[in-house]
Image (cartoon, rainbow, N blue to C red):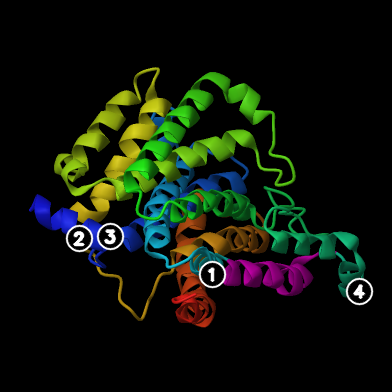
Amino acid sequence: MDVVIYMSMNALSHKNNFDLLRICAAIFVIITHAYALRGLPEHDVLFHISQATTSFSRFGLWIFFVISGYLVTASAWRSVSVVSYIAKRVLRIMPAFIIVIFLSVLCLGPLVTTLSFANYFQHPITWAYLKALLVFRIQYNLPGVFEQNLYPGAVNGSLWTIPYEIFLYILPLCLTLLGTLKKVAIVFLFVLWIICIYAVYNYASFLDLHTMPFLLLNMWHVVNFAIFFIAGSIIYLLPDNMKIARIGWIIPLALWAISWFTPYAVILSYIFVPIMIINFAYQTPYVRIPAHIGDVSYGMYLYAFPIQQIIMFLTHGTLSVSGLIILTICIIIPIAWLSWHLVEKPALSFKRFFSHV
């Protein structure tokens, strides 16, 4: 059984639950955002159960970054060149990201703004929103949009993680330069992982108060997300006889849950959560997402926040948290389906042009 698991992991078999996990992660983000957009603290059920160690949205982001580290490293290791690797990343991330920016400015904004149509399009903040197309200059408000909501002003608060995701793609890019030196790559990533954990544990306040020059990324978030991303990368690169699949995902989950009642809960999350996620993907019964549905998780993540804001706008903030969660999920799935089939999947078809570059 273990041998089969290792072979599947090495071959990146499609019989894994990464798609299911990403959909769950997107839903987790929706759950916590429902509290915030209802004007409440983001203290969801998981926040209370875990003794404030995590929340559904935080855990969802951890899932995204661990899986991204694992799969993007696999993509980098198999890429024939740096150009091929970069092209695949751009084609996966940017088309849907660009569309959601333009839809926010050209469709959502004019429909819900308190300004006149002319004043909205003449306002400098309207066109400043397009700076988000540069990825590292995310703007969250549009003039007159959602200003009376319980969570005022924010059009799409989910976009803030995209620059961090793209920045971390640099790590697998560096790995492509190592060629077949997998052991060197593992040592390099492991040392970097330890340094990141040490920095978060000892210099959290310092990191939180500083941003990266030019990219303007908060250093605490860079290091925190890097820990989960790097952990996914390391797990992918481990040789077969060192795979951690034998311990399954239930044991890491149990150890992580126990850690919630200790002073080391967050630090231990960096160890147990990546192991749990990757092993869950390969060791639970395979749940096939039908091809006609597709990979809807990215679309769910991109569009959920503005959909939630629209719902709160139309209901004048009277909808309950549970009602907002349920209604958002019902609406976001068909929207994410359209995003996959009309934007993301067609864009990915261009990868073949870079397969030999």
For disc 3, the marked residue is 17
Q: Looking at the picture, which amino acid does disc 3 mark?
A: Asn
Q: Looking at the picture, which amino acid does disc 2 mark?
A: Ser
Q: Nearer the viewer, mark 2 or mark 3?
A: 2
Q: Earlier in the sequence, mark 1 or mark 3?
A: 3
> Which element type, helix, strand or loop, lies under badge 1?
helix
Question: Which image quadrant is residue 306 in?
Answer: bottom right
Q: Residues within 10 Å of mark 2 (few under 14, many from 20)?
A: some
Q: At x 45% / y 80%, what residue is drawn?
A: 352
* Disc 3 to disc 4: CB gap under 8 Å: no
In this orientation, which residue lies closer to the viewer: 159 or 223?
223
For disc 4, the marked residue is 118
Q: Earlier in the sequence, mark 2 or mark 4?
A: 2
In this orientation, which residue lies closer to the viewer: 59 or 245?
245
* Boundaries of the magenta span: 94-114
Q: Looking at the picture, which amino acid does disc 4 mark?
A: Ala
> Which element type, helix, strand or loop, lies under badge 3?
loop
Percent across and percent down for residue 217 are 66, 42
Alpha-carbon span between mark 1 and mark 2: 26 Å
Q: Residues within 10 Å of mark 3 (few under 14, many from 20)?
A: many
